[in-house]
Image (cartoon, coloured by chain):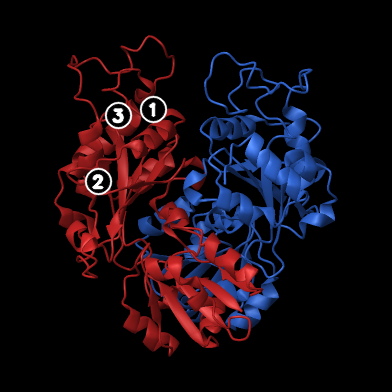
Chain colours: A red, B blue
Amino acid sequence: MLYLIGLGLSDEKDVTVRGLEAIKKSERVYLEAYTSILGVGKERLEAFYEKEIIVADRDMVETESDAILERANEVDVSFLVVGDPFGATTHSDLLLRAEALSIPYVVIHNASVMNAVGAVGLALYNYGQTISIPYFTESWRPDSWLDRIRENLSLDLHTLCLLDIKVKEQSIENLARGRKIYEPPRFMSVPTAIEQLLSLLPPPLPRKDDETSTLSDPTTTDSSPFTAPSPSNWLDPSRTLCISLSRIGDPSQTFVSGTLEELSHLDEDAFGGPLHSLVIVGKRFHALERDFARRWAVDKENWDRVAKEVYGVRD
Amino acid sequence: MLYLIGLGLSDEKDVTVRGLEAIKKSERVYLEAYTSILGVGKERLEAFYEKEIIVADRDMVETESDAILERANEVDVSFLVVGDPFGATTHSDLLLRAEALSIPYVVIHNASVMNAVGAVGLALYNYGQTISIPYFTESWRPDSWLDRIRENLSLDLHTLCLLDIKVKEQSIENLARGRKIYEPPRFMSVPTAIEQLLSLLPPPLPRKDDETSTLSDPTTTDSSPFTAPSPSNWLDPSRTLCISLSRIGDPSQTFVSGTLEELSHLDEDAFGGPLHSLVIVGKRFHALERDFARRWAVDKENWDRVAKEVYGVRD
């Protein structure tokens, strides 16, 4: 039997009882280690499971899946994934390959950031599509994710933004020379994510102090600032609320709430350790949610003011 | 300490090791029993935890939260929620009340249908907002959820539809007379959900066999069948793919895939036991996903044909 087991979010005790039982009886245990990380290292897992763990990088999962599946129709094999097995990537190819080899499989689910983001207090029903914000390089500045945020905001929906991680990446030079030398892991910080986001927006139009962007928009009767037609106005960093989450599910988890502008000015240390995510708040935002997230606000007065003036939140 | 603990999806062993430890050391253990159900009864949980469980219905959570929180600053109290603690409802009011009483709290996450739906093989990134389909009554046929499906489809996104459950509901007569007599629990089936959905759509326009709805739409260059302006055309049951999921995370979980029309004609037994959910597939649909879900198709040939002709899936 192949067990595809979610490990949850933080440490060795976030596995489910059912998952732990499957690991304990497995002959081989693999850990998928390229889409996310736990807050603890492989050694802590090995000590808790009393099992040796084989780390499976992207190469191994994508090109050597038959090695992972070897004899899994005779013995139990566990394939561990941080979060939920279907969170970051569906692993469909591994499961279809198992089926082609007549290997039965069982999926053991767990929390992932895709549902644990509920902890910031916004109803999960009001989230649109989740996006990933990739690291920009000098020559590569993809921006399609910005359209996804805009689509969500146009429907008044929140956006969960997952911030890039680089684990076991090679430099272009090492890649070209075929040298298996890897760069140190990198985890995108919240200020970097916001900085990249703002760098893609056109410069703001000059605006009178007493005039909001929506008032100048004759095509809509909606008061949303996000549906204004001017490309420089659809997202105003001083009038867009967001909530960052770091190490969600860990005892050290940290939330910070405020406008995009406020969060962009904070020191990286204010956000806690990686992994980081960012929620951009849409207009389906209610008084209880405002109160819940106010506890982490950079500036509580401004949080309430923007919630009222831009989001129309009433008590 | 107040522990808010997700139980996961199926049975007593889906709790995490961390969650089980918290339950074991708690003086009182409550089970929130109105937004979802496990596949096993309270007795199985009590035997496994070696703890008595107090079932907390909606009344108790909403009006007697201080009883739940009593002395939780001195002793440990566990509040158990099926799925993830923030899945169906955020429980923000309970947590804010705890904070007002200076009671510290810890959230222990788990899988919920909101992320376990990944098991049907569609990338979680390509889901839009999740909706609930409520039971219609003779006098109450809410339809705003239909707009949400349409919004998602207009962005080519999938929709997770959660089907209504009625637990501990009173009849109107018993409610009016103040009699605490409750109806037997009801769980919406997939055919009922689809029937309700189709009943809200206008009758289809007459259409030539060789003409698709989109060809007659001069306002779009997109080939999506969902953006056609005619209200009778935006969702065509014979040209819309969906995947049902039942008892997700349980050994008896059942998936069925096909067009809305195909699934509407199946017997309820084909879908397995409750709880049921339904995914309506958007156009961000890829060959590997088609292959993965084809395994559960009512009619595999038709599944592939619609994927190709309507969704534009190429090998």
Q: CA distance from mark 1 to mark 3?
A: 16 Å
Q: Residue furthest front?
A: A177
Q: Chain of mark 2?
A: A
Helix, strand or loop under label 2? helix
Q: Which one is earlier in the sequence, the residue at label 3 or at label 2? A: 2
Helix, strand or loop under label 3? loop
Task: Name the disc covering residue A193, or none.
Answer: 2
Q: Residue furthest top?
A: A218
Q: CA distance from mark 1 to mark 2?
A: 27 Å
Identify residue type, mark 3: Leu
- Left or right, B217 with respect to B267, comes to left
The relative height of residue A289 versus residue A150 in the rendered view (above or below) is: below
- Left or right, B100 with respect to B45, comes to left
Q: Position of residue B211 (x, y in %)?
A: 71, 21
Dot 1 and dot 3 within a common chain:
yes
Helix, strand or loop under label 1? loop
Q: Which one is earlier in the sequence, the residue at label 1 or at label 2? A: 2
Viewer-nearest residue: A40 or B103:
A40
The residue singled out by tag 1 in the image is A312
Task: Name which residue lies at 18% across and 14% down.
Answer: A208
Evaluate whether residue B32 shows in this view. Answer: yes
Viewer-nearest residue: A200 or B88:
A200
- Left or right, B220 with respect to A173, comes to right
**Callout 1 crowding tier (Cα within 10 Å): few <14, some 14–19, many ≥20:** some
Q: Position of residue A72 (x, y in %)?
A: 58, 81
Image quarter of residue A265: top left
The residue singled out by tag 3 in the image is A235
Residues at discs 1 and 2 in contact (Cβ within 8 Å): no
In this rendering, the label closer to the viewer, 1 or 2:
2
